[in-house]
Image: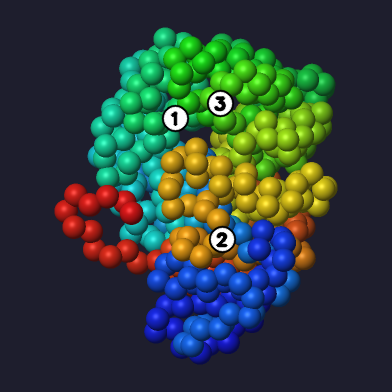
Amino acid sequence: MTETATGTANGAYLIRGAAILGGDAEDLLIRDGVIAERGTGLSAEGATVIEAAGLVALPGMVDIHTHLREPGREDAETVETGTRAAALGGYTAVHAMANSNPVADTAGVVEQVHSLGRASGWVDVRPVGAVTVGLAGEQLAELGAMADSRAQVRVFSDDGICVHDPVLMRRALEYVKAFDGVVAQHAQEPRLTAGAQMNEGAVSAVLGLAGWPAVAEESIIARDVLLAQHVGSRLHVCHVSTAGSVEIVRWAKERGINVTAEVTPHHLLLTDELVRSYDPVYKVNPPLRTDADVQALRAGLADGTIDVVGTDHAPHPSEHKECEWAQAAMGMTGLETALSVVQETMIETGLMTWADFARVTSTVPAAIGRVADQGRPLDAGEPANVILVDPAARWTVDPHKMATMGRNSPFAGKELPGAVVATFFKGHPTVLDGKLNTPYRYAADPAGAGSN
């Protein structure tokens, strides 16, 4: 990408010759936070020109599943560092999971996360509210208060812990209907996974590690899609990881049940064979599964059974991962590698196009989270949340060069395709030439103002 600076007083950027959604090359004129024009041969006096031949223009990515750790776990990540990583990864919005300390189970905590996101200015931070108080699975959290807060929460999850009580899950599904919310379930039957260390199968048997059976995930999904059907509510299934789970979601959709599902990049690429190394970087919840599961997940994402890619970005302090397997924390980073992993597993295999990529990483996750100004078409009059990607680029993952505080990337040392060249958030370039530029700065909020 080259730039021809001709003055930026009006905050205008002219992107020339980018392949829109991987299709024909066109120009995009960004001005005052929106796409002012789309076409060929555009010109604009005073605009900064970005020569984008060979680049793909896509709507900014939206992560439905991010752990930013703040408040309370700033030794692992902060809203500032996590959203810097998100911008570099091509994201313009992330949903911050509730398992912080204190837990995001009140209006006060979700408003704090919302305010931290606005102060950082790298992406739109949408707090996820806890389903139950303290993630304890005993009583519903303040769902209505969080929905009515400045954070306007629409996604609720105890992610990291399953809402295993069916009565409580039913009540949550019923409650969120009042404000068009969705319950995002971490599908894991705790009694079937007590002490589990990795996927239950041939590798766990050889290694002598306690197995994590696929049925622990599948049984909860089956229960919850029936509950969602019964109460007529929206259900979202986090990080689907087994072939059986894909089939259950497919069965539910065929019957018109209002369920959506996500898959992580690491479950699209990695298998439990890697655990033979006993390297805790491969310890994750849900665990890495078999190659047959990986292929089923790819097929499910390609045919629309799985709706979105969610990173489940889970940074940890080094001492929580650089230890023996049994004591290591579960989780992997993902914000800065997601695009490349999806390109390798889905686009370069011919399973998806870049237009499909935009659907599963931007349009649909924005719709699930009810984020109105994200995941929009790259057309005149639409919000200018835009990324430019170099699909021909190759790069080697070095966790120590990433913006996230977490060094626990399972892709360390691996060469991946594709690179984010520029990220425009609300028309402002947060990333240029693959490097952080400057954050977007919000106008001062009047008292009690919302999040727009």
Find numbered disc 2 in the image and state the secondary structure of the residue it sits on. Answer: loop
Is tag 3's residue or tag 1's residue first in the polypeptide sequence? 1
**In the picture, residue 435 is in which quadrant?**
bottom right
Judging by the rendered image, the residue that carries numbered circle 3 is 259
Is residue 122 visible in the rendered structure shown here? Answer: yes
Pair 2/1: label in front: 2
Q: Position of residue 238 (x, y in %)?
A: 56, 31
- Amino acid type shown at disc 1: Val
Report the quarter where the N terminus lies: bottom right
Is residue 403 visible in the rendered structure shown here? Answer: no
Is tag 2's residue or tag 3's residue first in the polypeptide sequence? 3
Between the residue at mark 3 and the residue at mark 1, the CA separation in whole angstroms equals 9 Å
Q: Position of residue 249 (x, y in %)?
A: 64, 23
Between the residue at mark 2 and the residue at mark 1, the CA separation in whole angstroms equals 27 Å
**In the picture, residue 301 is in which quadrant?**
top right
Identify the residue shown where x is 40% and y is 81%. 10
Judging by the rendered image, the residue that carries numbered circle 1 is 182
Q: Nearer the viewer, residue 409 or 19?
A: 19
Q: Nearer the viewer, residue 424 or 10?
A: 10
Identify the residue shown where x is 79% and y is 44%. 351
Find numbered disc 3 in the image and state the secondary structure of the residue it sits on. Answer: strand
Q: Position of residue 63 (x, y in %)?
A: 53, 46
Q: How is the image coloured?
A: rainbow
Between the residue at mark 2 and the residue at mark 3, the CA separation in whole angstroms equals 27 Å
Judging by the rendered image, the residue that carries numbered circle 2 is 378
Label 2: how many residues lie within 10 Å, few (<14), some (14-19) or many (20+)? many
Q: Nearer the viewer, residue 341 or 355?
A: 355
Left-right relation of 148 to 5: left
Find numbered disc 1 in the image and state the secondary structure of the residue it sits on. Answer: strand
* Callout 2 touching callout 3 (CB < 8 Å): no
Q: Position of residue 260 (x, y in %)?
A: 57, 30
